[in-house]
Each structure stands twice: as structure tokens, then as C-alpha cells.
Image (cartoon, coloured by chain):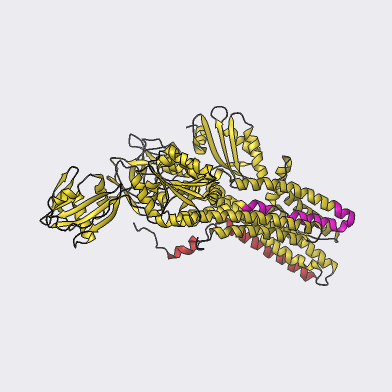
Chain colours: A red, B yellow
């Protein structure tokens, strides 16, 4: 029985971790642009070239 | 500049006796909120009109200057419980980003919470033989997870409902919040009591579906605003102004006045309409990319004194420019204004749906109360779930999404075809049009002269003929000379060119004397020999001949050719059941020629703008709904008077501001596809409205009879909204032949 309390507490901990990770991802702009990042690898480097 | 003035330039588009402002408000969620703002601002002294668009959260106010100031209006809006945000520029895009991130967090948190709650609370559905202590543990865990979901992800609904109730009106959030609290509160009580029904999982699921629906609705609204946004956002907020003494200062774009000199570095967007300064470091040419304005990404060259349009990208060396117009009067500002106008206005169908939705909410609340009362007298234990089911299942989300979703999808599709929608009602009215009135010159034909036909009379090739003609015309300033530009051949050079007024040109090429001009002029040096059957000249065309002392070589016909795709476009429009009429100010013969070539039987020539309107009125009297297409200043009145109208992208500003649609790429062949898209959009809107009404009519009795459990109701509600959005999305999908 007491193992159930431990498991529920662990489960809630993982839930909190998942929510924190999601909020971090949204706040750092991971969901802003879902297309261009994938295409960026196909583009030329535009460093110092004129 | 004082703070009040700065605020003024930042927010308003025009100044003067009649002031006008458009801004966004945060926190507007329903038609009820819109009326709240309208009432509050409309009651201020001097305010002439207030339009609030709930679909895209825009407020537009007209007021008499002097009677009241902008800060007072904004203050009134804040006191009504909404945060005003300026429309253009980075402030609005930051606002969109903030709104989007907050909505994403709400949806994400609700979805994680919903899944967790279902896992723990699944144990309570009586599948396994667990003891009471374990069931209690599961219920408490569910409460710990769902309560933050309710007060974080569900906050917009609770706050919205509170605002509605505190202003004594019923909005769409009222039944939603009522359902959430009615499910959550007894569950908390039952958890502590240790017996009774627990609805935490249903609460989490309902919030997830509702906030996902809100997120979709918000994306639709943002997409509508981004077309104008993309233009406005690409403009720099600040420019470097050059003072007469050579000093530089950073100023806001709004502060730039005509005549001011300013610097544009390489790679920067030019903020306002301007001309090249004579002493610019770049010399006398500016290299620009006008793709933002025209959609074509070729580099163009602007010599000094030519107007450089604001919104062009400087791809050449740094430029010193002299502003030709203020930010509010530049080309880009005019386009942005047209787009914004489309978004302030609310289509008729959407207004009808809004009115229906607020009635609907009142009816739901009554129904829920009646259901509760009846069940209470029959079986009190079942009264509560039935009331909950009625409240959840009838959430009017589908009804309120039905038209905006379809219109947004159709607008996106049209934009992809190269047609900008500048008035909200345009799509609905385009679908109903049955007659097309088209201008000829500049619309069906190209606006400038070009070579329509070349008849080769000797063995010389077409390219050689054009090369010789271009060499002879190289120095000429005659209007017709322009058509040969671009055909020059560097190996063919003409010497001793002489121009004979009203006859043609003469020059020596490779030792041979050539003439280009009227037939008699060329025949004077060329032996007539065999005269071939010549091209039949069209009324407004000019036929030119080319010949040397060896004989006539070619006959060239110059005129305004039909636009590529025009015959196909006309044929397709006729196949769609639209009657096509040509209404032109040109000479009769020219119009009849074009009509014959296009297969149009009704063509009217030599019409003044008034006569075009008269023609339109005549069609209207016969019950026809007219779609007018034109480009010139003389088409402005008929475009404004027609039920729905389209202006050419190269056409005059007057025509464009009068029209409902703007054909950006000048390709007439997209017109039939636009008509087909509009017709499908109208069909989808009707399907959506019909479907959401039918769903509610079927679901309400089932819920009231207690046949629907709260979680099933949440599922049904969200599936009905999803069906409406997916149905609308079909419109935006390309590649279905129309």
C-alpha cells in the first residue's frame, strides 16, 4: 500500500517536470516557427559573403 | 514632440478635423465584449462611430478632433476591462507572440493534466476491486492535478464569464464557466467526503478541448492580420536622418517629413516613398528589390528623380534619399490601409452568426435550468449530470467558428492565387455574381504598346528583323520606339540615322540603306516587286514596314496585345455561367476586335465613366449581380458601384481603393478560380452553419434526457468544432482542379 503513495508522488513529480519542460520550450520560442528551421539546412551560409 | 503628439502619430492614420484610429484590444472573446466596448466608447462626446470586430479583436473609432483626445478614448477602453494595443509595427507582433505563447501553454498544460487525470481516475470507473483508501488516494491525486488546470488553463473562460456577468450580459463564456465550476466544486466536496461522483477527468478534458478550440480560432485571427502585418512589420521603426549641417540623428519613421534627407544602408528596407538625393554615394542609380510590393523578386534599377516606393529593399550600395511623402501617405501605407479596412469590417454572415450565438447562450441557460428542475422532480440523483451535459454539449463554439474559419481559409487560398481581399464582404458577394463587366485597355489588354504580329516578307528571320528595327529605333524618342527596347543585337549597329517626321526612320546597317516606317516611306527605296497580302490592321494598331534597297523585308503590327490568359479566362468565366460584357472607353472598332478575339458578344465602346455606371444599373435592374474588373481612373466609379469588383495590381490607386479585390500578379486566368473558390467558401459556410445547428438540435434533447454523460458531451462539443474547422480547411487546400 505504502508503495502506492510513493509511486503517486513520483508520478506527480514527473508531471511537474513535463509541465516545466513544456513551458520552457514555449518561452524559448521552440514553437514559433515550425517550418523554416527544417529548411535552413538546405540554404547557403550567409556569413560575410557580399 | 510631446508625449501626447508622439502617441498620436503612433496610433492614428489620418489627422485633421475628423480623426480615425484602429487598434487591437487584448481580452476580447465574444460578441458581448464587442458591444461593451461599442457602448462605452460610443457614449463619449464627439465620437461619431465605433466599429468593433470580435473576430480579429480590432476596434476602429471615428471622432471629431478637439472634442476628445485619443488618450481619453484609450482610457475608456481600459476602464471597460480591455487593454488597447497599437496595431502596426513591433508592438502588435509582440502582442501576437505573447498571446500565442500564453494560449499554447494553456493548451499544453490542459492536455498533460487531462492525460494524467484520466490515468489516476480510471481506477474509479469500477473496473478493479480496489479498497476505499486507494480510491480516495486516486481522487485526491486527480484533484491536485485538475485544480491548477482549471484555474490556469481555464482562466480565460472564468474571467470572461465574470466580466460578462459583472456587466449584466450573457456571453459565450457564461455557460462554459458554469459547467466547469458545477463539475469541479461537487467533485472537491465528494473527494473530502469520500463518496459520490468525481468529475475531475471530465473537467480536464473539457478545458483541453475548449482551449484547443480557442487556440485554433486565435490562429485564424492572427493569420488574417499577418498579411497587413508582414508589410507593416518589414518597415524599419527608426531611420537615420541627415540634418542640413551634415549631422546624423536617429528618428522614428513617423517623424520623417517630405523633403527630409535620410540614409538607407545596404540590406535595409526603405521606410517611405523617396527620391535619390543628387549627391548620393551610390551615384545616380539605386538597386532595389520591390518583391514586398509586387511579389516579383527581380532586382530593379531606379535612376535619379524616379520615385522609389517605400517598402523596397536596398540591395545595392548605401543610399542617401530625400523623402517624398510621410510614412502615413506612402505607397505601402496605402496598401496596408486597404488590407486593414478588410479586417475592420465584419462580413454580414459573421455578424448574423454573432447575433445568433448570443441568443443561443440565453436559450441554453434556460434549457439547462428547465432540465435541472424536471429531473429534480423525477430522479434528483440524475439531475446534476444532465444539467452538466446540456451545458457542455451545447457550447456554441462550432456556431461561432463556422463563418470566420471558412472566410479565413478562402482568403488564404485567394492570396495564394495572387488576389488580395480588401473588403470583408467580397468573398460572399463574389460567390453570388452572375455578370462580369470588364474594361478593355489595361485590363483585357496590356497597358502598354507591344509588337502584336510580325509578317516576314522575305527570307529574313524574326530575330534579325527585330535586331535591325531596334538598331534604327535606338536613338528615337517616338512612343512606338519603346516596343523595340530589349530586342537590340550588339552586332547590328546603325549609322547615319535620320528621322522623317510622320514617316519613319532611315539608317545604314552593314553598308546597306534600311528604312522603317509607313509603307509609302519604305517603298520609296525598296522595289515593290511582289506585294504580299499584308496583315489586316486592327483599328487601334499601327502597321510599320521594314525594308532595304533590296526589297521589303517585314511588316510589323504594333498595338496593345491581349493579356496572356485573357481568352481562356473569359471562356472559363462563361463556362461558370457568368455573362461577360466589355465596357470600354476606346473606339468602337478596337473594342469589337477584342470582343471577337475573346468570344464576347456584348461589347460597348466609347463609354464615359457615367455611361459605365448606367450600364451597370441596367444590368442590376434586370436582377443581375455584377462583378466589375478594371484598372484605370475612369473605372473607379464603376468598381465602387458594382456588387463586387477587382482592380489590376498595376492599375491606378483610385481603381484599387474602390475595388474589393486586388489582382496582384495581373494574371486574368486566376479570376475563374477566384469565383470558384468564393462559391465553394459560401457553400462551406452554409454547411458549417447548418451542421452546427443540426448538431445542437440533436444533442440538446439527448443531453436533457440524461443519455449523455459529461465526458461524452465534452467529446461531442469538440468534435463538432473540429468538423467545422476541418470543413473550412478544405478551401485552403490547393490542387483540386479549381
Q: Image quadrant of residue A10?
A: bottom right
Residue A12 in view: no
Question: Left or right: B115 with respect to B268?
Answer: right
Residue B120 in view: yes
Up-down relation of residue A20 to residue B271 (above or below): below
Asked if residue B381 is among those painted magenta in the image, a careful observer would answer yes
- Residue farthest along the left direction in this orientation: B511
Q: Nearer the viewer, residue B116 or B499?
A: B499
Asked if residue B186 is among those painted magenta in the image, a careful observer would answer no
Q: Main secondary structure of the magenta part?
A: helix
Q: Position of residue B681 (x, y in %)?
A: 57, 55
Question: Left or right: B331 with respect to B20?
Answer: left
Question: Residue at left 55%, top 45%?
Answer: B623
Question: Residue at left 84%, top 66%?
Answer: B133
Q: Position of residue B162 (x, y in %)?
A: 72, 45
Question: Residue at left 59%, top 39%?
Answer: B51
Q: Nearer the viewer, residue B22 or B108?
A: B22
Q: Position of residue B247 (x, y in %)?
A: 35, 37
Q: Nearer the viewer, residue B25 or B638?
A: B638
Q: Image quadrant of residue B680?
A: bottom right
- Residue farthest along the top direction in this orientation: B66
Q: Position of residue B520 (x, y in %)?
A: 17, 48
Q: Image quadrant of residue B333?
A: top left
Question: Residue at left 36%, top 51%?
Answer: B594
Magenta-colored span: B373-402
Q: Nearer the viewer, residue B453 or B606?
A: B606
> How many labels, in total?
0
Amino acid at each position: 500500500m505504502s508503495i502506492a503513495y510513493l509511486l503517486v508522488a513520483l508520478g506527480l513529480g514527473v508531471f511537474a517536470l513535463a509541465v516545466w519542460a513544456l513551458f520552457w520550450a514555449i518561452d524559448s520560442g521552440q514553437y514559433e516557427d515550425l517550418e523554416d528551421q527544417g529548411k535552413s539546412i538546405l540554404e547557403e551560409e550567409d556569413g560575410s559573403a557580399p | 514632440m510631446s508625449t501626447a503628439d508622439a502617441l498620436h502619430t503612433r496610433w492614428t492614420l489620418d489627422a485633421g478635423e475628423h480623426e480615425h484610429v484602429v487598434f487591437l484590444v487584448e481580452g476580447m472573446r465574444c460578441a458581448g465584449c464587442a458591444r461593451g466596448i461599442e457602448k462605452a466608447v460610443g457614449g463619449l462626446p464627439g465620437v461619431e462611430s465605433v466599429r468593433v470586430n470580435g473576430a480579429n479583436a480590432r476596434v476602429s473609432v471615428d471622432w471629431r478632433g478637439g472634442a476628445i483626445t485619443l488618450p481619453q478614448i484609450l482610457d475608456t477602453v481600459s476602464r471597460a476591462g480591455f487593454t488597447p494595443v497599437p496595431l502596426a509595427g513591433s508592438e502588435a507582433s509582440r502582442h501576437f507572440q505573447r498571446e500565442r505563447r500564453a494560449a499554447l501553454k494553456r493548451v499544453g498544460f490542459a492536455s498533460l493534466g487531462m492525460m494524467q487525470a484520466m490515468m489516476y481516475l480510471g481506477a474509479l470507473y469500477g473496473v478493479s476491486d480496489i479498497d476505499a483508501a486507494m480510491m480516495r488516494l486516486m481522487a485526491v491525486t486527480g484533484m491536485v492535478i485538475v485544480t491548477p488546470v482549471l484555474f490556469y488553463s481555464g482562466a480565460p473562460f472564468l474571467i470572461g464569464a465574470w466580466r460578462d456577468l459583472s456587466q449584466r450580459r450573457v456571453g459565450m463564456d457564461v455557460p462554459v464557466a458554469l459547467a466547469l465550476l458545477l463539475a469541479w466544486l461537487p467533485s472537491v466536496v465528494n473527494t473530502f467526503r469520500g463518496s459520490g461522483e468525481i468529475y475531475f477527468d471530465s473537467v480536464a478534458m473539457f478545458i483541453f478541448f475548449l482551449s484547443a478550440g480557442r487556440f485554433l480560432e486565435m490562429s485564424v485571427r492572427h493569420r488574417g492580420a499577418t498579411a497587413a502585418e508582414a508589410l507593416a512589420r518589414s518597415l524599419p521603426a527608426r531611420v537615420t536622418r541627415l540634418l542640413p549641417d551634415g549631422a546624423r540623428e536617429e528618428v522614428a519613421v513617423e517623424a520623417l517629413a517630405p523633403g527630409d534627407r535620410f540614409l538607407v544602408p545596404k540590406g535595409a528596407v526603405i521606410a517611405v516613398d523617396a527620391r535619390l538625393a543628387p549627391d548620393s554615394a551610390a551615384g545616380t542609380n539605386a538597386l532595389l528589390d520591390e518583391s514586398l510590393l509586387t511579389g516579383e523578386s527581380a532586382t530593379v534599377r531606379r535612376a535619379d528623380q524616379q520615385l522609389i516606393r517605400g517598402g523596397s529593399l536596398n540591395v545595392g550600395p548605401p543610399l542617401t534619399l530625400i523623402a517624398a511623402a510621410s510614412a502615413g501617405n506612402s505607397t505601402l501605407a496605402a496598401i496596408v490601409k486597404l488590407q486593414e479596412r478588410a479586417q475592420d469590417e465584419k462580413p454580414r454572415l459573421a455578424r448574423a452568426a454573432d447575433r445568433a450565438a448570443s441568443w443561443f447562450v440565453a436559450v441554453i441557460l434556460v434549457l439547462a435550468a428547465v432540465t435541472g428542475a424536471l429531473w429534480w422532480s423525477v430522479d434528483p440523483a440524475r439531475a446534476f449530470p444532465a444539467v452538466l451535459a446540456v451545458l457542455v454539449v451545447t457550447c456554441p463554439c462550432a456556431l461561432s467558428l463556422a463563418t470566420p474559419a471558412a472566410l479565413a481559409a478562402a482568403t488564404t487560398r485567394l492570396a495564394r492565387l495572387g488576389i488580395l481581399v480588401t473588403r470583408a464582404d467580397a468573398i460572399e458577394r463574389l460567390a453570388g455574381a452572375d455578370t462580369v463587366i470588364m474594361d478593355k485597355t489595361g485590363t483585357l489588354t496590356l497597358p502598354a504598346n507591344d509588337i502584336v504580329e510580325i509578317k516576314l516578307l522575305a527570307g529574313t528571320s524574326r530575330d534579325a528583323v527585330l535586331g535591325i528595327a531596334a538598331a534604327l529605333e535606338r536613338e528615337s524618342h517616338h512612343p512606338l520606339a519603346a516596343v523595340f527596347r530589349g530586342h537590340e543585337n550588339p552586332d547590328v549597329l546603325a549609322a547615319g540615322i535620320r528621322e522623317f517626321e510622320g514617316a519613319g526612320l532611315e539608317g545604314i546597317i552593314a553598308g546597306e540603306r534600311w528604312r522603317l516606317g509607313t509603307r509609302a516611306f519604305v517603298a520609296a527605296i525598296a522595289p515593290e516587286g511582289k506585294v504580299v497580302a499584308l496583315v489586316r490592321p486592327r483599328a487601334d494598331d499601327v502597321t510599320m514596314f521594314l525594308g532595304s534597297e533590296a526589297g521589303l523585308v517585314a511588316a510589323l503590327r504594333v498595338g496593345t496585345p491581349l493579356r496572356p490568359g485573357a481568352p481562356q479566362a473569359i471562356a472559363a468565366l462563361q463556362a461558370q455561367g457568368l455573362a461577360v460584357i466589355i465596357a470600354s472607353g476606346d473606339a468602337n472598332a478596337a473594342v469589337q476586335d477584342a470582343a471577337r478575339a475573346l468570344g464576347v458578344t456584348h461589347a460597348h465602346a466609347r463609354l464615359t465613366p457615367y455611361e459605365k455606371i448606367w450600364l451597370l444599373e441596367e444590368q442590376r435592374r434586370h436582377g443581375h449581380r455584377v462583378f466589375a474588373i478594371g484598372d484605370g481612373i475612369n473605372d473607379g466609379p464603376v468598381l465602387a458601384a458594382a456588387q463586387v469588383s477587382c482592380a489590376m495590381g498595376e492599375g491606378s490607386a483610385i481603381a484599387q481603393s474602390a475595388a474589393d479585390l486586388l489582382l496582384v500578379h495581373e494574371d486574368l486566368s486566376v479570376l475563374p478560380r477566384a469565383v470558384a473558390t468564393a462559391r465553394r467558401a459560401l457553400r462551406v459556410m452554409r454547411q458549417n452553419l447548418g451542421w452546427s445547428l443540426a448538431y445542437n438540435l440533436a444533442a440538446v434533447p439527448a443531453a436533457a434526457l440524461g443519455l449523455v454523460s459529461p465526458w461524452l458531451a465534452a467529446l461531442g462539443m469538440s468534435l463538432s468544432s473540429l468538423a467545422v474547422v476541418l470543413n473550412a480547411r478544405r478551401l485552403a487546400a490547393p490542387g483540386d482542379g479549381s
